[in-house]
């Protein structure tokens, strides 16, 4: 039976219902499109912290390389700090700073002495 | 009477082009309306092209996501239905190519005039018989007859979706109908 006319076939096709999509399809399409939330941007403080770290790293690499490498610079710094003379002067400096800040009348006495001249 | 998916005589705000414009302006409900309007048509195209409901589901979603991301490339003078059908058809073609590559097999190019037992079981009425007959068509005829079903006698639109010349669409459609008649006749004559 191969005698269906073109019109009959067209009518059959037109009457053919569309396929029923899965119930959750629309929700998943919308979730992937209009409801899709892009990843959270980096916080300003986080960006600043990374910037500072990057700048320090860059400085360390470039400045350090001028002195024969970053590790060499660190070693030289540590060696200088460990010298007795450096430690002595650091101790004296810290002690003087502490004494001056702990003696409240020191400034006033100093000013009176100057007036006496 | 063909299934009319694009409603051209509507107000500009609710026409397809109007909705695209609103979606581009940041109105999320506009794209949701387009999804609602085309979901069934796209899913039908995907099911008929892929013959696999799970794959069709993914292809439909992929088509909408691609359309959403490239909404700016849609030209207002074009027809939205043609544009989105084309995206969906290409998503289906990609999936078919992948499945062929992985299975290492070519899909049958000629129609199988005897639908399988599963198809026959659901073909207990006219719609079921026609659906089974379409499924039995070769891929290129399945797509053209499905778009003919969805878009009506708009051969140039079908040609745009499939990316083939107008003459090829007419030839494929003629052969698809011929094969459909044969398959339907065979299924009606079967005891």
Image (cartoon, coloured by chain):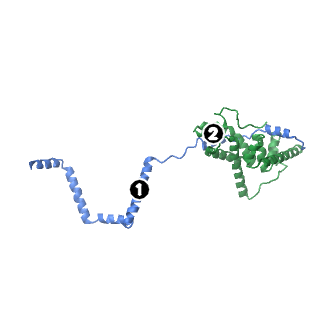
Identify the secondary structure beneath mark 1. Answer: helix
**What chain does badge 1 belong to?**
A
User: For this rendering, which residue is in front, A1 or A22?
Assistant: A1
Residue A38, by quadrant, is: top right
Q: Identify the residue under disc 1.
A: A55
Spot the residue most to the left.
A116
Residue A80 in percent (x, y) is at 30, 65
The local crowd at label 2, few if under 14, some if 14 to 19, many if 20 or more residues have their Cα within 10 Å, is many
Residue B76, by quadrant, is: top right
Q: Residue at x 65, y 47 (%)?
A: B62
Q: Residue at x 71, y 57 (%)?
A: B101
Image check: A109 left or right of B74?
left
Question: Disc 2 to disc 1, how far (Cα)?
Answer: 46 Å
Chain coloured green in this rendering: B
Residue A4 in percent (x, y) is at 88, 41
The local crowd at label 1, few if under 14, some if 14 to 19, many if 20 or more residues have their Cα within 10 Å, is few
Q: Identify the residue under disc 2.
A: B20
Image check: B82 left or right of A110?
right
**What chain does badge 2 belong to?**
B
Chain coloured blue in this rendering: A
As drawn, B40 above or below A98: above
Is residue B79 shown to the viewer in this render? yes
- Circles 2 and 1, Cβ within 8 Å, touching? The answer is no
């Amino acid at each position: 039976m191969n005698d269906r006319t073109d019109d009959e076939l067209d009518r059959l096709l037109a009457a053919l219902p569309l396929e029923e999509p899965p119930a959750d399809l629309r929700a998943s399409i919308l979730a992937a499109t209009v409801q899709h939330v892009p990843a959270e941007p980096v916080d300003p403080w986080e960006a600043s912290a990374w910037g500072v770290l990057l700048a320090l790293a860059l400085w360390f690499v470039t400045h350090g390389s001028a002195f024969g490498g970053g590790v060499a610079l660190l070693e030289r710094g540590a060696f200088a700090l460990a010298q007795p003379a450096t430690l002595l002067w650091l101790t004296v400096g810290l002690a003087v700073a502490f004494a001056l800040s702990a003696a409240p009348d020191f400034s006033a006495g100093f000013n009176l002495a100057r007036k006496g001249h | 009477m063909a299934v009319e998916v694009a409603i051209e005589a509507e107000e500009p705000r609710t026409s397809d082009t109007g909705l695209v414009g609103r979606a581009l302006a940041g109105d999320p409900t506009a794209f949701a309306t387009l999804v609602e309007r085309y979901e069934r048509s796209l899913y039908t195209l995907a099911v008929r092209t892929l013959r696999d409901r799970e794959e069709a589901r993914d292809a439909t979603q992929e088509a909408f996501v691609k359309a959403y991301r490239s909404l700016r490339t849609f030209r207002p003078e074009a027809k939205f239905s043609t544009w989105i059908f084309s995206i969906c058809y290409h998503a289906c073609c990609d999936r078919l190519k992948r499945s062929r590559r992985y299975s290492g097999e070519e899909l049958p190019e000629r129609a199988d005039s005897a639908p399988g037992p599963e198809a026959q079981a659901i073909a207990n009425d006219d719609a079921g018989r026609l659906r089974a007959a379409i499924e039995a068509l070769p891929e290129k005829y399945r797509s053209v007859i499905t778009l003919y079903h969805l878009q009506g006698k708009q051969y140039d639109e079908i040609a745009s979706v499939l990316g083939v010349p107008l003459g090829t669409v007419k030839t494929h459609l003629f052969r698809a109908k011929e094969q459909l008649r044969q398959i339907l006749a065979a299924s009606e004559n079967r005891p």
